[in-house]
Amino acid sequence: MESLSYDIVILGSGIAGFTAALHAARSKAKPRIAVISKMHAMRSHSVSAEGGISGVLYPKIKKDTEDLHAYDTIKGSDYLADQDAVEILVKNAPSEIKFFEHIGVPWNRDEKGTVQQRPFGGMSIPRTAFAADKTGFFMMRALYDQALAVENIEIFHEHLATAIVLDKGRFAALPTIDIATGEQRIFRSRACIIATGGFSRVFGFTTTAYSSTGDGTALAYRAGIPLKDMEFVQFHPTALIPSGILITEAARGEGGYLFNAKGERFMERYAKNKMELAPRDIISKAIISEIEKGRGFPDKEYGYSYVHLDLRHLDRRVIDEKLPMIKEITIKMLGIDPGDEPIPVRPAAHFTMGGIHTDIKGRILSQEGRPFGGLWAAGECGCVSVHGANRLGSNSLSQCSVWGRITGEAAADYASKEGRPAESEEIVRKIDEEERRISGILESDGSNNPYEIKKMLNKTMDSRMYVYRRVPEMRKAIAEISRLKKEFNDIYLEDRGRRFNTNLRDVLEIGNLLELAAAVAESAVRRKESRGAHSMVEYPKRDDKHWLKHTLISANEGKIRISYLPVTLGGWKPEERKY
């Protein structure tokens, strides 16, 4: 087993991971950095981000302020966001947009050269900068090109992390599998940043890539690190039927309408002032309400009822210049030109507000609030918490950029001062234990097909943990996930080889999804209120008296522990959420 030593290891190669790498690499100490990606780094799911990145760029021209951005974000979060974290987001987001301009992102501009900003749901002012509807791709391309040019960054493509090794509350090592060879490789470093994105693939109907299996979050959970606010999973209102491919919020930002089967622009019933530009949780609930009341379009072939997203009234130039990928997707997938026909859409799992428990600096914390030495989380996998119960569209890329920079700079500073953890019996034992675990999986000769387990997990989450949640259904979900976890202990592998064993990779990802699904369901059934993306039929109202708090869940030797933390309030007091 090969062992490699670096000053900083970054697990994940999306916008958060590469932003962290660049800012760490440019520090005075010039640390040696390894970026670990389970696929080719440019295939990170960040390339799929479409609509844009939020920030107050022209306060005088647009009469916009950081306070207004903060208020929109906090109100959008249904007042579960930590307000000190939100203040960091809105203060730093504009400089991050400028940073990406400097490294080559081609922001759309008007005839005066001003960066264009489109409206997004829940935002009072159009403050979403964009590069057509391929913003994530352009940001990733710029970051990747920059990283390739930096001598002290080394990228390890197709390396799957299988564990996080801690020793005495401090990061020690990251065991991985080189997918090309099947060899296990250990990365040791002074500091580690986890930036592996979200875990929406616990659901079957989702906008996210098949790679969005929350690996870093699951590995942290297995290592005894608590997860926060796992019950809050965002359902994007407009996913293409039947594939779940994202139809960006920019389509509504540019003026798209939602219609039910009766031809009604139904958002007037749910958010009269904002209509299609209400926050995502409100629109998703509105769509499902319309469908449940029999006003959706039935799809007999796939079983998904849906509504229509209509762009036909838009100028063709708007679609061609600002929504070219949406046109490409709908023509390719359904043979529909959005300038001629409406698009069939339905809510799909999209973004996970919950994740690894961190402070506002991105430091990973224990259940008691103590930082783990040399360990940070950035981007979607790190729950700061800046999104609370519901994220506003385009705040995610701001989050990835802002905390990518914060954690990268902090890790570089830490690595310049701290020595590498000394080899201990505990570290050696954990690494050996992980090697035996992987070998045991490769030799698995049980009776259960892991892909059938994943199929049943997705079905369970789609049917019992969707937009509207009911207590009996959630309890059934917990029982079914528990049964599936037991079945997972008795699986078989078709491929016993080492080289390019995607069967082994899939199995490890399924194991991660099972852990995370259990954490989502266990956290959700206890929160007896409706707040943001968590909507309980039995408890339809928000309950600030009892539930203005974050959920913490951790697991130790199979036993789940749940506790709660108060939300950090500031200048914005909770009020009724009206749009």
Image: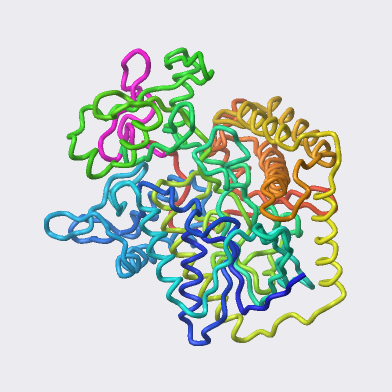
Q: Nearer the viewer, residue 404 or 553?
A: 404
Identify the image quadrant of the N terminus.
bottom right
Identify the image quadrant of the C terminus.
top left
Q: What residue sits 63% from the left and 74% below the top?
A: 191
Q: Quadrant of residue 295?
A: top left
Q: Position of residue 49 (x, y in %)?
A: 42, 49
Look at the image and say whether residue 444 sits in the magenta stretch: no
- Locate residue 186 relative to residue 230 in the image: left or right: right
Q: Position of residue 197 (x, y in %)?
A: 55, 53
Q: Position of residue 374 (x, y in %)?
A: 65, 74
Residue at the extreme left of the image, as rendered:
111
Q: Nearer the viewer, residue 228 or 152?
A: 152
In the rendered image, the vertical position of residue 135 relative to residue 341, given as above or below: below
Q: What residue sits 44% from the left and 39% below the top?
A: 576
Look at the image and say whether residue 268 sits in the magenta stretch: yes
- Locate residue 299 relative to residue 2 in the image: left or right: left
Q: Nearer the viewer, residue 216 or 491?
A: 491
Q: Position of residue 147 (x, y in %)?
A: 45, 71
User: Tell me, what colour scheme is on the image?
Assistant: rainbow
In the rendered image, the vertical position of residue 180 relative to residue 550, given as above or below: below
Marks counted in the figure total 0
Q: Quadrant of residue 306?
A: top left
Q: Quadrant of residue 7?
A: bottom right
In the rendered image, the vertical position of residue 95 relative to residue 312, given as above or below: below
Q: Nearer the viewer, residue 552 or 487?
A: 487
Bounds of the magenta segment: 253-279
- Locate residue 379 relative to residue 119 in the image: left or right: right
